[in-house]
Image: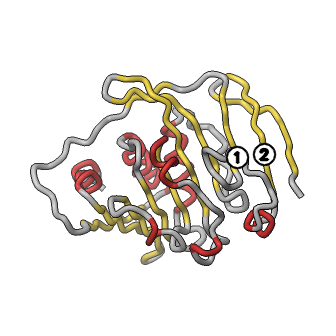
Amino acid sequence: MKDIKSHRSCFLGEHCTTKLVTCSLRALQRREIEPVSKRRVKATVFRISPRRTVHTAVNYMTCCNSFSSNVVSKEIMLRAENETEQLASIVSANVNFGDIILLYGDFGSGKTTFARAFIRKILCDPSLIVPSPSYLLMNEYKVTREIQGEIKKFYVYHLDLWRIESSENLPPIDLQNILHRGACLIEWPAAIEKLLPYEKLVLRFSFFDGKRKVELSMFGPKWQCLQDHISNF
């Protein structure tokens, strides 16, 4: 059964209408449920459409003169939650169309903290309620950004594939269209990682000596340039 609820929420001092669509994963896989948008995404979507969009500017990373064709890794100890939020802020400030960020880690390791801080930074709303897409599979956020001197619509797609065991169980998602429209942040991405482009940022959260630790794997020249921006950690 499809259950649709509409309610009001506060977004940057303005009100927006939020539509919540829920359905069973099994029914979605049988394609018995009409997707929210055939063109955008053939999956369950929690769409946030503010009446007044947010204008932000992308701070492009100044790339180093040389980079490795192989993956570059860096480990960071996160001594407090605010350090996880600072890392998310650095990454989100440089995100662009087609970017993919994958989050691995056990429950409570820091994935959710990072994801929420990442989305709040992009939408310029530190108090924004960021619901988990665990049962909806994907949440979509819309923002306008200044990119290379132009104001463009930019979408952030937050996926949580915790319940998806393999790519065969994944509902049809138009990944190419998603990456054309914005960036993709994926928690529990094991089922889909092999289907993704090579260039991406992978964060693996874990616990070490009573503290949280994250290993960043930077695939491709853009993400390898992130090293200079996180050198103080």
- Helix, strand or loop at disc 2? strand
**Tag 1: amino acid:** Phe
Whether residue 14 sits left or right of residue 114 in the image: it is right
Q: Residue at x 59, y 57 (%)?
A: 173
**Tag 2: amino acid:** Leu
- Helix, strand or loop at disc 1? strand
Q: Residue at x 45, y 55 (%)?
A: 84
Q: Which residue is mark 2?
A: 20
Of residues 69 and 78, the one nearer the viewer is: 69
Whether residue 121 sits left or right of residue 218 in the image: it is right
Q: Which residue is mark 1?
A: 46
Q: CA distance from mark 2 to mark 1?
A: 5 Å
Q: Residue at x 46, y 47 (%)?
A: 183
Of residues 95 and 84, the one nearer the viewer is: 95
Q: Position of residue 90 (x, y in %)?
A: 37, 45
Of residues 60 and 29, the one nearer the viewer is: 29
Residue 158: mark: none
